[in-house]
């Protein structure tokens, strides 16, 4: 197991370096915004770019970039967006918003998704199953921004139950009731997709498990249906479901571009896209660093979790 | 049963007869009544201007001319005093809730700001030496003293022999008395030292501040500002804005490269941005965009391969030979060899320079002298205009916000000798911001919200000169990325204004709360009138002016604009943005000449016997829509085209080419189709003439070759130069070789007569337009030999009068008909409103200073909760 973990970590580091290198070279190869949009004095713009090291060879820039990170933990300052402000500071300011809204969403979505999935599996091919499956298909196929606009229009504008946009920290702390209430519409909008995914997956896994021979054996041993389901079926069905839930939790750091925009949540969702649009190299690379690391760690953790959830699964063994 | 049915039918017929008869009787009575009252003996007023389509001639009425002053116009210092009591003394609390789409690029320092969002905060927390506020008549602007306590005084003569000033020079050195009450939000006084420190920092060669060019780019250049900024450095200098050396001025070095007389190498700009000659683009940009349509590209590949990393190629005979054909080999680009030096770039080494040689001089604790490279004409307006900003930073904070780097981007200390660049986070948070304006930043949350509150230390709340202003206590700006969210927030009373998009206009277009911020563009429907191309297309009825007039008058431009665009209904070539008098900011459209052009065009009359009492009333009644007149014109057109033998009652489908076929274009097309068919009702064209839409991304080019019947066209110009557009865009060439899109409308064959000071002047419309564009070589001569003065020699009102007549003359042929003035539409809240409803350049709607409230915060909350809010 330890050998497997070390091997995976080494592979992860290699993958990380390859991705970082590719992204750095590719973003540097994109043309910079036209000088005419940057000011009246062309020479000034060009000199500013020179001062920012843009004219050095790309690999020299890459070397300096890593040197600053490794020796000083310095990811640089914003050059086109949040100019002059430390990249890490800006990211740390924005991540909590994304975490909070996604966390609430998952905490609501997981029990609902599981319950609906279990119920649908238990009522397989009955009208309840068809009803839930239809709902799930609807939630799954309609883009989240459609729900978001509907939720905003009905729950915020028409009824006035919730504010149209998330509260600012001027009036509410992150974990205050005011902040929570203001985030409910976004949380609901985000939860639709997670509920749908989890319901579908749970139903499929549990349905498969319920047809297993060992369940028949359990019933013949004298267990009631409920006992067989809770003691045997659920346990086995959860093996693939729990890593999925774990992945959802790790994904909450990623933010949601569309939902954050609609409900004016200043999360991290649109940072990546904007940094590419405006060619802010430091923000782009810091985002790449963060998301790549997040993705690779999430993959590793999910893989390893199988072994912990089900001791029969031995990692790294043939 | 059958009998009953018959009886009921009889009864019904009888009832109908009674009602019908009753109605007739009433009509009869009315007729009798009117005939018994003698009609007033007033002669019906007739339009003064007349256009004769048969002879292609226009009589554009008379004018009494007044020559302008050689010293320029008079500026106003009489500013609007606001509404008494609705100002900063009002004890109730008022919050202005605004929104923005993002704060990701925000750095609202005077030295580094970039975006409109930055300047929005700057407007609240800074003040210029001089301000431009609404004039007392609410028609234009007036100049006020802000960070300066007096108007600038020309002291050039005191600096002869210094700062490049020579004997006899004037209008180069300006003494500015500083406002002694100005201070930072913490109460620290702002004096001449503050300015010297701040301006020196702005031009700091190492910091390379984004806004450094505020002191050396443009028309109001501070003496030696650029030399100080680049001191000790070698920088590329664009030849077009520098010495403009010709090849003959240069010397050849040993390796064949040319050098300036100062021994600096010269290059050719291949992929190097040329700020002046190419508007900041590179030649490679243009070659990439237009290819061989505009350039001769035989040598281009070889040339561009020689460019270095900066896009420059050393100038040698060989590279010159490769370069010259590119820009001179294709007549479409329109340049000759004489223009080639404009593509030269040479190295310029700036000598070391002490700050004392820069033209910003402290002459007292509260006195500065501002010295410019060139004299400033019309100084009473342009000097305050150029000094309407100040660039101040609070020294302790500014220094604390600096981060120093060496050439490798490593952080170094302030005292390091290896400092290669400096970055700053000044004005990026509340803690790094210091205000010297009417509001101070009290909260800033990245990409979420910022709040400004009254800066009690601002001089304006104490000097008594700002009474009637600043009723707003607090400004809260939310970040709302999605337009739909902003629209809902506005309707819920959470924000006090929202911009509108075209799709919103059906809902809000007719609201009393819509405000338009005009752009300089007018969108029109432009007709092909070229007989040959129309005959080939089978649409020669368009050559008939009455037909075009009928179509134009049938378009309800008010409805079109308010339901399908964010623009204002357009009736003339120029909208309200165009300023006829730059010294007061008054709009051309508000002049009698500008009004009369449209009143006459649409056949309204005023005065004794007229439809309206006075010119203002008549102008306000202009709609451009007259269905009765449209059908009358169509009926006349029918008779004319039949008589001319160009129409034989066949079905005709006119074609309109549009850029794309999205929903809004389809709606526009349907609107126009209905208008055309409606105009034909009751005429010989009814049921025979219709319209079809064709999508064509190159519809302009298609029209330039006579390949279609109708297109949408849009032209705009400089708001302060309204009179050049007529020649440049509408009269330069009728064959598609120029800018004019009215294909076939030869304005050199349209004769326009204007009686000026009792003398008739008749010239072609094209010549009149050229004269009105300020062309000094064009002279308007009467038959008796009298000559008009050069157009620019007349006073602003006379110029507006002349132009109004020419605008009428052009539009009266209906070769183009205005539809809407492009604008940005927005809604204002029921909570309050700006001082004026019509946008005025420089002062907008009056700004936050004159924003007044109908409800304070508590009353507004109650009003919103009552459910009465409705737009």
Image: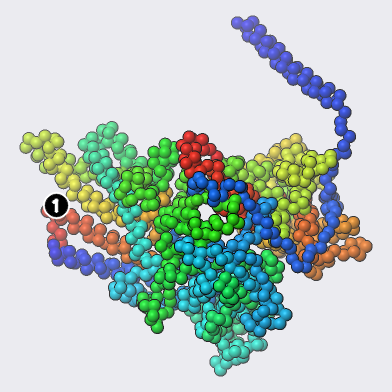
Question: On the rendered image, what quadrant is the N terminus of chain B found in?
Answer: top right
A64 shown above or below B560: below
Q: Nearest the camera: A124 or B30?
A: B30
* Residue at (46, 75) in percent of width and height: B207
For the image shown, how many numbered marks are present on the structure?
1
Asked where in the image residue B740 lies, by quadrant, the reply is bottom right
Residue B41 rendering spot, x and y as whole percentages: 89, 34
Residue B270 rendering spot, x and y as whole percentages: 56, 77
Name the residue tied to disc 1: A310
* Residue at (49, 40) in percent of width and height: B859
Asked where in the image residue A87 lies, by quadrant, the reply is bottom left
Q: Residue furthest left?
A: A221
Secondary structure under badge 1?
Answer: loop
Dot 1: chain letter: A
Q: Nearest the camera: B205 or B472?
A: B472
Q: Is residue A102 left or right of residue B525?
A: left
B478 shown above or below B257: above
Question: On the rendered image, what quadrant is the C terminus of chain B found in?
Answer: top right
Q: How is the image coloured?
A: rainbow
User: Can the viewer see residue B307?
Assistant: no
Q: Nearest the camera: B461 or B406?
A: B461
Q: Is residue B820 left or right of residue B104?
A: right
Q: Residue furthest right?
A: B784
User: Can the viewer see residue B182?
Assistant: yes
Q: What is the crowding at mark 1: few (fewer than 14 residues within 10 Å), some, or many (at least 20)?
A: some
* Residue at (70, 56) in percent of width and height: B586
A98 shown above or below A214: below
Residue B793 rendering spot, x and y as whole percentages: 79, 65
Residue B644 rendering spot, x and y as whole percentages: 83, 47
* Residue at (50, 49) in percent of width and height: B96
């Amino acid at each position: 197991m330890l050998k497997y973990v070390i091997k995976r970590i080494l592979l992860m580091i290699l993958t990380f370096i390859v991705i970082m290198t590719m992204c750095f070279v590719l973003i540097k190869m994109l043309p910079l915004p036209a000088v005419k949009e940057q000011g009246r004095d062309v020479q000034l713009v060009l000199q500013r770019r020179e001062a920012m090291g843009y004219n050095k060879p790309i690999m020299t820039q890459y070397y300096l970039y890593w040197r600053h990170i490794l020796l000083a933990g310095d990811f640089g300052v914003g050059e086109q967006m949040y100019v002059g402000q430390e990249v890490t500071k800006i990211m740390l300011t924005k991540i909590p918003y994304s975490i909070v809204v996604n966390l609430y969403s998952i905490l609501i979505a997981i029990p609902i998704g599981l319950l609906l999935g279990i119920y649908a599996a238990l009522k397989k091919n009955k009208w309840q199953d068809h009803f839930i499956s239809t709902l799930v298909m609807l939630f799954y196929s309609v883009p989240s921004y459609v729900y978001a606009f509907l939720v905003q229009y009905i729950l915020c504008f028409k009824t006035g139950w919730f504010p149209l946009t998330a509260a600012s920290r001027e009036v509410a702390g992150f974990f205050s009731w005011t902040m929570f209430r203001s985030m409910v519409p976004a949380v609901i909008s985000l939860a639709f997709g997670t509920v749908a995914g989890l319901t579908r997956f749970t139903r499929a896994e549990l349905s498969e498990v319920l047809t297993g021979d060992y369940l028949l054996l359990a019933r013949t041993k004298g267990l009631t249906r409920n006992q067989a389901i809770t003691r045997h079926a659920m346990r086995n069905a959860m093996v693939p479901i729990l890593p999925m839930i774990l992945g959802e939790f790790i994904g909450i750091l990623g933010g949601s571009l569309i939902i954050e925009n609609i409900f004016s949540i200043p999360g991290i969702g649109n940072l990546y896209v904007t940094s590419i649009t405006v060619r802010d190299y430091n923000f782009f690379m810091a985002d790449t660093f963060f998301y790549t690391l997040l993705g690779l760690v999430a993959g590793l953790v999910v893989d390893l979790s199988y072994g912990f959830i089900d001791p029969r699964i031995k990692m790294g063994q043939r | 049963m059958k009998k009953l049915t018959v009886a009921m039918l009889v009864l019904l017929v009888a009832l109908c007869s009674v009602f019908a008869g009753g109605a007739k009787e009433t009509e009869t009575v009315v007729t009798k009544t009117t005939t018994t009252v003698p009609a007033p003996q007033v002669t019906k007023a007739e339009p003064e201007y007349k256009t004769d389509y048969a002879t292609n001639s226009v009589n554009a009425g008379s004018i009494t001319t007044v020559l302008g002053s050689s010293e320029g116009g008079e500026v106003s210092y009489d500013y609007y005093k606001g509404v008494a009591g609705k100002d900063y003394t009002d004890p109730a609390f008022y919050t202005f809730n605004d929104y923005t789409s993002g704060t990701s690029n925000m750095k609202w320092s005077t030295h580094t700001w970039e975006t409109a969002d930055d300047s929005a905060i700057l407007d609240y927390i800074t003040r210029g030496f001089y301000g431009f506020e609404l004039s007392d008549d609410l028609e234009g602007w007036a100049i006020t003293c802000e960070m300066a306590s007096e108007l600038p005084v020309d002291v050039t003569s005191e600096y002869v022999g210094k700062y490049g000033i020579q004997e006899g020079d004037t209008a180069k050195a300006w003494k500015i008395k500083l406002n002694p009450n100005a201070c930072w939000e913490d109460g620290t006084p702002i004096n001449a030292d503050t300015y010297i420190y701040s301006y020196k920092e702005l031009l700091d060669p190492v910091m390379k501040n984004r806004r450094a060019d505020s002191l050396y780019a443009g028309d109001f250049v501070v003496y030696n500002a650029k030399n100080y900024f680049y001191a000790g450095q070698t920088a590329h200098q664009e030849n077009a804005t520098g010495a403009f050396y010709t090849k003959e001025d240069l010397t050849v070095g040993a390796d064949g490269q040319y050098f300036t007389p100062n021994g600096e190498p010269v290059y050719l700009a291949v992929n190097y941005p040329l700020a002046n000659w190419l508007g900041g683009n590179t030649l490679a940009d243009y070659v990439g965009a237009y290819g061989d349509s505009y350039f001769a590209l035989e040598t281009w590949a070889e040339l561009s391969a020689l460019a270095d990393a900066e896009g420059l190629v050393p100038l040698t005979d060989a590279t010159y030979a490769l370069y010259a054909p590119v820009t001179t080999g294709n007549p479409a680009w329109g340049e000759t060899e004489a223009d080639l030096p404009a593509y030269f770039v040479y190295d310029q080494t700036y000598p070391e320079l002490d700050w004392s040689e820069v033209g910003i001089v402290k002459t007292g604790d509260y006195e500065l002298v501002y010295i410019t490279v060139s004299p400033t004409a019309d100084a009473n307006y342009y000097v305050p205009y150029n000094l309407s900003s100040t660039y101040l930073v609070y020294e302790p904070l500014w220094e604390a916000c600096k981060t120093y780097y060496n050439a490798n981007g490593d952080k170094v200390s302030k005292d390091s000798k290896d400092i290669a660049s400096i970055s700053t986070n000044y004005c990026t948070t509340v803690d790094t911001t210091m205000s010297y304006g009417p509001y101070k930043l009290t909260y800033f949350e990245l990409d979420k919200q910022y709040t400004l509150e009254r800066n009690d230390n601002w001089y304006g709340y104490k000097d008594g000169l700002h009474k009637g202003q600043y009723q707003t206590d607090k400004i809260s700006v939310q970040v709302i990325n999605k337009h739909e969210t902003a629209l809902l927030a506005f309707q819920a009373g959470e924000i006090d204004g929202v911009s509108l998009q075209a799709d919103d206009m059906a809902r809000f277009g007719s609201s009393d709360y819509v405000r338009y911020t005009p752009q300089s563009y007018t969108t029109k429907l432009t007709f092909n009138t070229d007989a040959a191309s129309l005959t080939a297309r089978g649409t020669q009825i368009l050559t008939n002016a009455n037909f075009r007039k009928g179509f134009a008058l049938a378009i309800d431009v008010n409805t079109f604009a308010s339901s399908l665009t964010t623009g204002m209904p357009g009736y003339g070539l120029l909208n309200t943005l165009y300023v006829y008098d730059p010294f007061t900011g008054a709009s051309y459209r508000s002049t009698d000449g500008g009004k009369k052009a449209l009143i006459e065009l649409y056949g309204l009359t005023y005065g004794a016997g007229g439809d309206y009492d006075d010119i203002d009333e008549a102008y306000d009644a202009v709609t451009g829509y007259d269905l009765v007149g449209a059908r009358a014109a169509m009926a006349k057109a029918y008779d004319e085209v039949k008589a001319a033998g160009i129409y034989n009652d066949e079905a005709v489908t006119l074609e309109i080419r549009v850029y794309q076929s999205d929903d809004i274009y389809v709606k526009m097309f349907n609107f126009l189709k209905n208008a055309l068919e409606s105009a034909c009702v009751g005429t010989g064209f009814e049921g025979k003439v219709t319209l079809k839409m064709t999508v064509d991304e190159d519809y302009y080019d298609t029209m330039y070759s006579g390949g279609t019947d109708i297109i949408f066209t849009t032209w705009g110009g400089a708001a302060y130069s309204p009179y050049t557009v007529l020649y440049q865009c509408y009269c330069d060439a009728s064959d598609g070789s120029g800018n004019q899109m009215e294909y076939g409308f030869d304005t050199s064959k349209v004769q326009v007569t204007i009686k000026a000071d009792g003398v008739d002047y008749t010239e072609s419309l094209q010549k009149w337009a050229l004269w009105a564009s300020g062309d000094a070589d064009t002279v308007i001569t009467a038959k008796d030999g009298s000559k008009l003065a050069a157009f620019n020699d007349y006073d602003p009102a006379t110029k507006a009068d002349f132009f109004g007549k020419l605008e009428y003359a052009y539009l009266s042929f209906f070769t183009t008909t205005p539809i809407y003035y492009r604008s940005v539409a927005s809604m204002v809240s029921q909570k309050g409103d700006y001082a004026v409803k019509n946008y005025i350049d420089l002062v907008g709607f009056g700004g936050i200073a004159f924003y007044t409230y109908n409800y304070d915060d508590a009353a507004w909350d109650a009003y919103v909760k009552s459910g009465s809010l409705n737009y």
